[in-house]
Amino acid sequence: MNCMGRLLLDGAQRRDWLRLISSENVGPITFRQLINRFGSAADALSALPDLARRGGLSRPIRLYPAADAERDMERIAALGAKLVAYGEEDYPALLREIDSAPPLLCLKGQTSLLALPCVAIVGARNASALGRKFARQLAAELAQAGFLVVSGLARGIDTAAHEASLSVATAAVLAGGLDIVYPPENADLHGSIAERGVLIAECMPRTVPTADHFPRRNRLISGMSYGTLVVEAAVRSGSLITARLAAEQGREVFAVPGSPLDPRAGGTNKLLREGATLITSATDVIEALAPAIGRPVRVKEELMREDEGSASPSEEIGSGEEHQRILQLLGPAPVEVDDLIRESGLKTSLVVAILLELELAGLVVRQRRNHVSLA
């Protein structure tokens, strides 16, 4: 359904969206393509088995059971949280700009805070006392200036940023489910943010975070923020992953300089050498972000609204020979889809349809910035 120009799903549609994004080989980009192609999650779910078979999957594709989706939704409600869809009112507006925006987010707390412009503060888990002090100062001043301070509830800099902005506006993006406290020592802070700030999770309740969840979480931290501020970070750290994602998403990257003798400053000094903006105060951040905040949010690709009628599914069906032509052009190194179209000599719509089928079959992996590679 549609209310005041915004997407508004009913219970059955929300369940079907959850089933679709949770089904085998369906990621955010594939989800969007399926909705745009078939007009609804229900119709896309019906089409998945045939699409995967055409892509080369020799067994039935695993669809997420309706009963499991209903159970997830019940658990979210029992937590006092809600499941918000891309395009609905509480979905972070800026996050909709990124290619891999999740179709659904679990939110708990003061969701009205998500209407504020966001700035991310991240850094070392083993942060120095000086680094934590400066992170607290930055977070408090940015929150007072009208920003929602976003971080990942990790030890060190993340914790300092959340604690300092909790009384005004803070958001924690979790790598697991809303009900999973990580790290355990942040249990009280997790509970306080759930009441006074806002918790955000892409994963369903009871999902325990594993190593691959954290980079996915980091893209949300940077994706919903106008800028990402790194206080302390080693050269190899999750904070630098967040900074790299922010740069790829076209967002500002800020870094606090540090002593060359401190390994915790190696990553921030590296960011500065690569062009990040040096900051020494919250004012530096506020002034740098002012022009971006004044511009309207640019949504790259709208999901088709489920109440506007079914789409006309593409009639493009590739032959086995054309599927093989695409597979032969692919390798382990990511290639841009536009290059694949040019080298294959096939129509754009046909290549897009074939890639969708190959991805659902598990033969192709979609990478960042419109690149694909062999799985």
Image: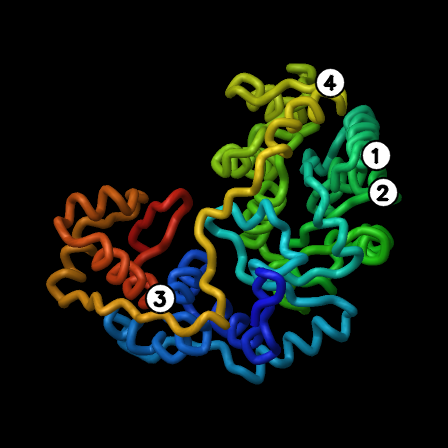
Q: Which mark is residue 37?
A: 3
Q: Which mark is residue 282?
A: none
Q: Can you identify the residue that label 1 sits on?
A: 144
Position above or below: 29 against 75: above
Position above or below: 274 against 224: above
Task: Identify residue type, mark 2.
Answer: Val
Position above or below: 180 against 120: below
> Foreground mark, 2 or 4?
2
The residue lying at 53 percent from left, 82 percent from top is: 66
The residue lying at 40 percent from left, 77 percent from top is: 43
Q: Which of the 4 quarters of the picture holds residue 222?
A: top right
For label 3, count other residues whose C-alpha is less than 10 Å away and answer few (under 14), some (14-19) or many (20+).
Answer: some
> Foreground mark, 3 or 2?
3
Q: Which mark is residue 168?
A: 2
Distance (Cα) linking label 3 and label 2: 42 Å
- The spot of residue 201 in percent (x, y) is 65, 58
Position of 143 with respect to 238 (left or right) is right
For label 4, count other residues whose C-alpha is less than 10 Å away and answer few (under 14), some (14-19) or many (20+).
Answer: some
Task: Identify residue type, mark 3.
Answer: Arg
Q: Are the residues flagged by discs 1 and 2 in contact, CB closer than 8 Å?
A: yes
Residue 158 in sight in this render: yes
Position of 97 with respect to 257 (left or right) is left
